[in-house]
Amino acid sequence: MTINNEGIALEVQDLEVRYGGIQAVRGISFSVNPGEIVAMIGANGAGKSSTLRAIAGAIPHAGVIRLGGEVIRTVHPEEIVRKGLSLVPEGRGIFANLSIEENLRLGAWTNRKEFDVNLEKVFGLFPRLRERRDQMAGTLSGGEQQMLAVGRALMSRSKILLLDEPSMGLAPKLVLDIFAILRDINKAGVTLLIVEQNAVMALRLAHRACLLELGSIILTGTGAELLENPKIRSAYLGQ
Amino acid sequence: MKYLAQQAINALQLGSIYALIALGYSMVYGVLTMINFAHGDVFMLGAFFCLLLIAIVPVPFWVALIVVMGATAILGTLIERFAYRPLRDAPRVSAIITALGCGLVIQNTTLGISPYARPMPHLLDNVTYQFGGLTVTTLQIIIIGVSVGLMMVLDFLIRKTSFGMAMRAVASDRATVSLLGVPANEIIAITFAIGASLGGAAGLLYGMAYPVVSAGMGITVGWKAFVAAVIGGIGNMRGAVLGAFILGAVEVMTVAVLPSTYRDLISYSLLLLILVFKPHGLLGKPTLHKA
């Protein structure tokens, strides 16, 4: 583990998350460098979502989380967003009874001055959203809702985006689309930490990755290395 | 015919007051899926705040309205902050019991300070106008006008402002709202403040219309407004207004044709009918609640 925190966007040390008596995350450590895509893969209940939710300030944690060198202690997610980190939650969390534009406006709550500029950027990435900006978000298809969720998180101009299962419930073609857009977003300078059960897609996209099992990191490496790992091939790629 | 038109004006007056209170129930239910049973007592305190204010300084109606709305807004925020927020994630039953408890504390404290009903002094020169045989008083015009005005302001707030957008988002998914950097607690506090201020305004208007103020008003009138909110579909703002005007009309018409003691029987029977045939209220939508 590096001592110099200057070059690290997000650093997690000995992170633990408990729900009552159940320990979901058992002292994991990892870091994400600026501009990097890190993927976290693993089965249901491995502790992936809990890790993201703890980093986003949505649930209490033990251990140290540093965001750009600053230790995060809060359990108020809105403070984390102001520090430049946004979570796209599992299941997207779209406000079905609000219009698409209203959903995006809410995403821009911490950064309202540049709303128009950011809105253009998001519409540039997701032209479907522009066509339907006045429609209720609940009328969108699953893939469009995922695009809206990602676009909404981008409206805050966060430097770091956490994505919880962006491929969930989507047809394979749409998964490819979403991951292509995530790559574009990363190329535009946004650091990504992605949690996925779709290990192939996540490992192909990621610069680095780790495998979680029962709340512990049991493997780390580059995305390509993990794709070649026999254990991952048998357990997660069905080979 | 003339008699019916006259009753319609009375119904509008009562309906407006019910609507202002019902909106407070519905707003809070909308954001927290919680029935704020102390709301009727906030309405009652609105009338008492007015009595207190004009006992100290004889201010005109408009000033009294603004002061009362401000005072009840603060009260609503305090109730939310200290009674409900600590129990936000507790089982729903705890929140309901706390709300009932808050109501009882407010009601009995008021009863302790003012055991008897008090007359509300005149805040306005009440002029009676004749329109083709119909009698309309300044008071009725003011009550209906102020109520409708406040409802239009609220409608604008909810549909067109950032606060309203955030309030609708909190109602839809509170956890996700925080993840976007929206301070959900502030939005909830403002929702309570607005709801309570409308209740306070209703208390003042009710005190002026039926010029006796008592600690039991929160139960007798406040709960009727709750019934109105349920009839319209609790959580739905337009439903609250619709339910209130229907209930106001039903009550006024009941008293016009039947002995006045039948009024509550008919009101609550209407509630029962609605709950049997349209359990989500007239404009409410069935929702799935997470456990």
Image (tube, helix red, strand yellow):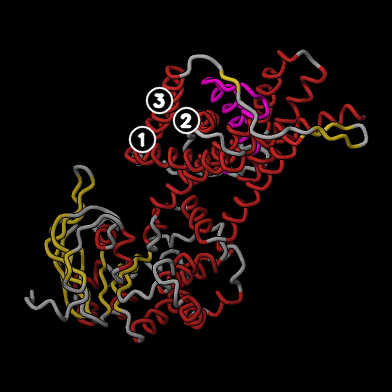
- Amino acid at the residue labelled 3: Gly
Pointers 2 and 3 in contact (C-beta within 8 Å): no
Residue at the (20%, 58%) spot, across then down = A73
Disc 1 element: helix
Q: Which three-letter amino acid code belongs to the residue tagged 1? A: Ala
Viewer-side residue, A122 vs B71: B71
The magenta span reads: B207-235
Chain under label 3?
B
Badge 3: few (under 14), some or many (20 or more) residues near its Cα, within 10 Å? some
Query: How many numbered marks appear?
Result: 3
At horizontal 84% and vertical 35% (from top left) the residue drawn is B129
Chain to which the residue tagged by mark 1 belongs: B
The image quadrant where one finds the C terminus of chain B is top left
SS at mark 3 in the image = helix
In the picture provided, is A188 more to the left or to the right than B243? Answer: left
Which of the two discs, 1 and 3, labels the residue nearer the N terminus?
1
Going 30% across and 81% down the picture, which residue do you hit? A204
Residue B148 shows in this picture: yes
The image position of residue A37, as x and y in percent, is 27, 79
Question: Which residue position is annotated with label 1?
Answer: B83
Most extreme residue toward the bottom is A187
Q: In the image, are marks 2 and 3 on the same chain?
A: yes
Q: Amino acid at mark 2?
A: Ala
Q: Which is nearer the N-term, disc 1 or disc 2? A: 2
Residue A164, position in %: x, y? Answer: 34, 65
User: Which residue is identified by label 2?
Assistant: B38
Say yes or no: labels 1 and 3 on the same chain: yes
- Is B234 part of what is drawn in magenta? yes
**Crowding near the residue tagged with mark 2, few <14, some 14–19, many ≥20 C-alpha atoms within 10 Å:** many
Residues tagged 1 and 3 counted as in contact (Cβ below 8 A): yes
Q: Are marks 1 and 2 in contact (CB under 8 Å)?
A: yes
Per the model, the C-alpha gap separating discs 1 and 3 is 9 Å
